[in-house]
Amino acid sequence: MPKNNKKALGKERLIWMYTQMLRIREFEERVKRTFVEHPGVIRGHTHLADGAEASIVGALATRDESDLAMPSYRCHGYPIVLGTSVKKMMAEIYGRKDGLCQGFGGSMHLADPAHHFPGTSGIIGQAIAHATGAALAAQVKKSGQVIYCFFGDGASKQGAFYESLNMAAVWKLPIVYILENNQYQVYTRVELEDANAAAGDPLSQKAQAFSIPGLTVDGTDPLKVYEAVGKAVKRARAGLGPSLIESKFYRFSAHGNAITVPPVPTQFPEHEAIETYGRKAEYAAARARDPILLFRKKLKSKGVLSESAAKQIEDSVRAELEQAVQFALASPFPSPEEATKYVYA
């Protein structure tokens, strides 16, 4: 992974970014389709982040090889960018023995330390504390690592957010906090939250409480995210402490989905904008600003990506994820005797 350098964003790197965005989207589409095409295969919850691809890829494109990425439970996209096997990821979500965690972690608890992805937490806001601890360890060990901490707008109201950012600011820890504002907290539209529970718009102004830089960026544009996060990473690596980046985009899927039971559904649940508020126009407007469509259009206009090259990438990604699904379906389940293998008293 090249160091944060604008010169690194040549044609090859831009196409890499586009490809990673497609891989994230296709992976989540296959997870979504599993509930309909293979009912009962996924046991438990999945939380999709379709719409966040530009934010994820733009941020992680700035990292050095040893830097850690630590998100919360809506976590499929990050390890994909870091190089984790999508076959093992899919098998893990299917609860199979060939999965990343041998089927014991599932969608919300992916981990791949070999690819600098220590693991995630299913508790809202808890990953912020975990990432801050990792940043303290990096500082003490003088490893030169920067920690990328990703969390949702809802998590910014947890006590762990305030405690962690305060400590990171005081000790100038090498961490970048990336607040992913996807417009909805489960079923609640962001501007409908209790006014006393939020700092207001933009949420990046919360950084003022800790005397650290705060910036809001268009999370549908990977290049804008790359620029903003790149500056924050440079600051953290220089020993100047943390920054708070609010990346704004729109989550296209429902908050989450759980195990299906008969009758088998014919489609995945619609978004909260439609299900809860009936805001079809809002959802349609967001879809029109799909970050993948916008970035593909930008790359084509700049002569970076041709129509035939785009089609070739799309076909390759779809084939890759079809192989991942088949690998996961063919993988065995852990044996009943292994149920207590990783349980400690």
Image: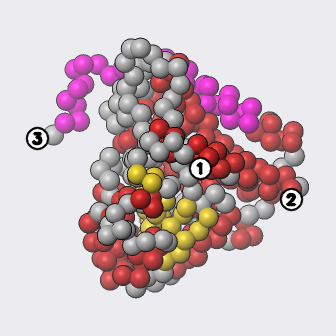
Q: Label 1 amino acid?
A: Glu
Q: As rendered, which of 318 and 116 lies closer to the eye?
A: 318
Q: As rendered, which of 143 and 317 lies closer to the eye?
A: 317
Q: How far apart are marks 2 and 3 (CA)?
A: 58 Å
Q: Residue furthest top?
A: 263
Q: Which is in the foreground here, disc 2 or disc 3?
A: 2
Kindly identify which residue carries mark 3: 345
Vertical comparison of 319 with 246: above or below: above
Q: Classify mark 2: helix, strand or loop.
A: loop
Q: Residue at x 86, y 59 (%)?
A: 302
Kindly identify which residue carries mark 2: 302
Q: Residues within 10 Å of mark 3 (few under 14, many from 20)?
A: few
Vertical comparison of 67 with 294: above or below: below
Q: Label 2 amino acid?
A: Lys
Q: How far apart are marks 2 and 1 (CA)?
A: 30 Å
Q: As rendered, which of 190 and 212 lies closer to the eye?
A: 190
Kindly identify which residue carries mark 1: 282
Residue 5 left/right relative to 63: right
Q: Which residue is drawn at 19% across and 36% down?
A: 343
Q: Main secondary structure of the magenta part?
A: helix
Q: Give the range drawn in magenta.
A: 314-343
The x and y percentages for residue 227 are: 64, 71
**Is residue 102 shown to the viewer in this render?**
no
**Is residue 184 shown to the viewer in this render?**
yes
Q: Find residue 262 and report its image quarter.
A: top left
Name the N-terminal-most of marks 2 and 3.
Answer: 2
Q: Quadrant of the N terminus?
A: bottom right
Q: Label 3 amino acid?
A: Ala
Circles 3 and 1: CB distance less than 8 Å?
no
Q: Classify mark 1: helix, strand or loop.
A: helix
Q: Which is in the foreground here, disc 2 or disc 1?
A: 1
